[in-house]
Image: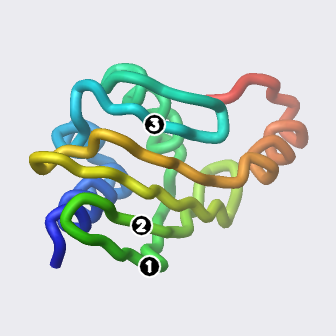
Amino acid sequence: MSAALETALAYHRAWTGGDLDRAMTYVADDIVCDAPAGRIEGVAAYRAFLGPFAGMLRSATLLAAFGDDETALVMYDTETTLVPSAPGAECVTVRAGRIVHSRFLFDRVPFDAARRRLGETSRP
């Protein structure tokens, strides 16, 4: 298994398993994440971004994972308290065993629709 893929999968297993503290050990202090909501910089901001989603996670199913020495792509489907199926993908760059960049893709539409049904206006 490639170095980047090993790191990406360890990170994925940690946060989808409910251990956000462990997941953050795979993330560089100066991570840059490009997500649907915009750019997130730094490990504290990244944790604040991921934490609410991880908190509503019920289960995750790994769909595919590929990688080389520096880049890995992990695609998965999640079940959350808001929606029964929320597919996502992360393409990460890894250096020295830590994720330094993440391109985080997911569809916000099902979450927005669920929140409207519940009368919520804020996003985690």
> In 3D space, how far apart are the residues under numbered discs 1 and 2 (Cα atoms)?
6 Å
Side of 84 relative to 68 (left or right): right
Q: Return the mark for residue 33.
A: 3
Q: Residues within 10 Å of mark 3 (few under 14, many from 20)?
A: many
> In 3D space, how far apart are the residues under numbered discs 3 and 1 (Cα atoms)?
20 Å
- First in sequence: mark 3 or mark 1? 3
Residue in the image at 43% along x and 74% along y: 62
Could you tell me residue 64's position as x and y percent?
A: 44, 79
Q: Residue furthest left?
A: 96
Question: Could you tell me if the residues under marks 3 and 2 are in contact, i.e. CB atoms within 8 Å?
Answer: no
Could you tell me residue 54's position as x and y percent?
A: 45, 44
Question: Could you tell me if the residues under marks 1 and 2 are in contact, i.e. CB atoms within 8 Å?
Answer: yes
Pick the residue in front: 74 or 61: 74
Side of 92 relative to 30 (left or right): right
- First in sequence: mark 1 or mark 2? 1
SS label for mark 2 = strand
Q: Return the mark for residue 64.
A: 1
Pick the residue in front: 48 or 39: 39
Q: Which residue is mark 2?
A: 74
